[in-house]
Amino acid sequence: MTQRIAVYPGSFDPLHNGHLDIIQRCRPLFDEVVVAVLRNTSKGKGLFSVEERVEIIDETLNDLDGVRVESFSGLLVHFMEAVGARTIVRGLRAVSDFESEFQMALMNRRLDSRMETVFLTSREEFSYLSSRLVKEVYLLGGDCQGLLPPQVLRRLAR
Ligand code: PNS
């Protein structure tokens, strides 16, 4: 039987509890989930390097079978082809996410019509969370307990 492989792509700088929740909830829907960390981001200098992000996500997902993490550059659909995936998983927080997510889903389908995007709605308690906001709170000395997995908090403390 063909393996149902999904890719959960993102910048993950850093991975926050909203991301983790989406990974845990999408895992049972597929045979394997590949968390894909984007390399060629236009978002400027990151909090963590791509290598550190991959390491942290790997450490955080250690107990979760059927999930692995990789980095990718270039087009997402090319990466998906390379890992044999046909489904893109994205989290949807609020109406404001919808427009850009809709555009990305349509663009990806145009680039490769075999690729489908599946959206999981975020849990209420994480619906306001974004890496950008958490990064800002952290850099300005705010408390990030409960927003970030312990593995990320430990790295930040180093
Ligand atoms: O966490 P983010 O920053 O919202 O994730 C955005 C991401 C990585 C999913 C998106 O930028 C992406 O897929 N980039 C790869 C380049 C690409 O394939 N672009 C064309 C389709 S949108």
Image: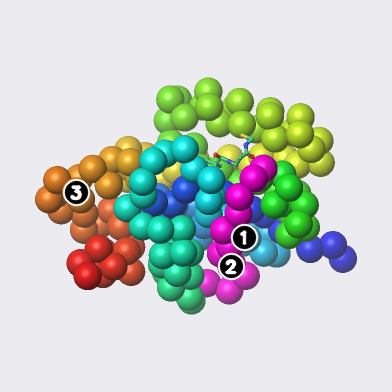
Vertical comparison of 107 with 128: above or below: above
Q: Residue under circle 3?
A: 139
Residue 91 seen in the current view: yes
Res 106 quadrant in image? top right
Vertical comparison of 94 with 124: above or below: above
Lower position in the chain sequence, tag 3 or tag 1 = 1
Labelled disc at residue 34: 1
Left or right: residue 32 compared with residue 123: right
- Label 3 neighbour load within 10 Å: few <14, some 14-19, many 20+: few
Span highlighted in magenta in the image: 64-75
Q: Are marks 3 and 2 in contact (CB under 8 Å)?
A: no
Residue positioned 61% across, 31% down in the render: 104
Q: Looking at the image, which residue sits at the far bottom?
A: 63
Lower position in the chain sequence, tag 2 or tag 1 = 1
Q: Nearer the viewer, residue 81 or 42?
A: 42
Q: Are marks 2 and 1 in contact (CB under 8 Å)?
A: yes
The CB of the residue at mark 2 lies under 8 Å from ligand 1: no
Lower position in the chain sequence, tag 3 or tag 2 = 2
- Residue 37 at x, y percent in the picture: 53, 54
Q: Residue under circle 2?
A: 68
Q: Look at label 3 and name its amino acid.
A: Leu
Label 2 element class: strand
Ligand 1 lies in which image quarter? top right
Q: Look at label 1 and name its amino acid.
A: Val
**Is residue 73 found inside the magenta-colored segment of the image?**
yes
